[in-house]
Image (spheres, rainbow, N blue to C red):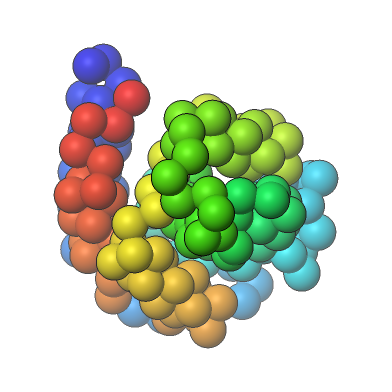
């Protein structure tokens, strides 16, 4: 319950910050927090007015590749905000009716193994969420300023994970 309240407070505060941010991204402002992941495998985006890096989002391609290597997973997308990873997966047809807790646990371990700063991993196999995450990941990779879709992303996360741990 505490973590849910903290997550909601951080997201609300981040929403306030994005309302004042400019809509341009300077490639020199990209920041790579994880020393174990090369710059080519993570795309970071930060609003220039966000001095405390509160609204950074990044696509974690290395984590997505490790997740897709699981026999139960067909494809995956991972977006990281601060110490939270949001994972959208398509499971293989043979895995759809299996123990999802076990699969989610494996996914969480893979994500945390690629980035030690990740505390929380939220996994969904919802097809609509998967499609939205594909769009968000594409927007981030193409340099679209997050201020343009951060509110939508936040609302999507709230709907898909209403009882975040």
For this view, does 75 lie left or right of residue 1?
A: right
Spot occupied by residue 36 in the image (x, y as percentages of width and height): 81, 45
Q: Please state, as top left, top right, bottom left or bottom right, where the N terminus lies in the image.
A: top left
Above or below residue 117? Residue 36 is below
Q: Residue at x 33, y 25 (%)?
A: 165
Is residue 133 in view from this perspective?
yes
Q: Residue at x 40, y 76 (%)?
A: 135
Is residue 108 in view from this perspective?
no
Above or below residue 49? Residue 34 is above
Spot occupied by residue 129 in the image (x, y as percentages of width and height): 32, 61
- Front in this rendered view, residue 164 or 107: 107
Above or below residue 36? Residue 44 is below
Above or below residue 164? Residue 78 is below
Spot occupied by residue 53 in the image (x, y as percentages of width and height): 46, 49
Q: Residue at x 61, y 76 (%)?
A: 27
**Please, which residue is most extreme toward the top here?**
2
- Front in this rendered view, residue 163 or 46: 163
- Front in this rendered view, residue 99 or 158: 99
Spot occupied by residue 150 in the image (x, y as percentages of width and height): 29, 63
């Amino acid at each position: 319950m505490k973590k849910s309240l903290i997550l909601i407070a951080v997201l609300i505060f981040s929403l306030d910050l994005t309302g004042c941010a400019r809509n341009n991204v300077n490639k020199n402002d990209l920041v790579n927090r994880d020393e174990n992941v090369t710059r080519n495998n993570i795309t970071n985006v930060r609003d220039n007015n966000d001095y405390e890096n509160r609204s950074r989002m990044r696509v974690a391609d290395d984590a997505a590749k490790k997740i897709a290597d699981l026999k139960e997973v067909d494809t995956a997308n991972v977006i990281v905000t601060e110490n939270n990873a949001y994972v959208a997966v398509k499971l293989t047809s043979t895995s759809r009716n299996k123990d999802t807790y076990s699969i989610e646990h494996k996914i969480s371990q893979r994500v945390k193994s690629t980035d030690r700063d990740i505390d929380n991993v939220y996994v969904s196999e919802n097809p609509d969420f998967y499609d939205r995450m594909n769009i968000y990941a594409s927007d981030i990779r193409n340099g679209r300023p997050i201020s343009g879709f951060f509110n939508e992303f936040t609302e999507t996360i709230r709907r898909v994970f209403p009882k975040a741990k």
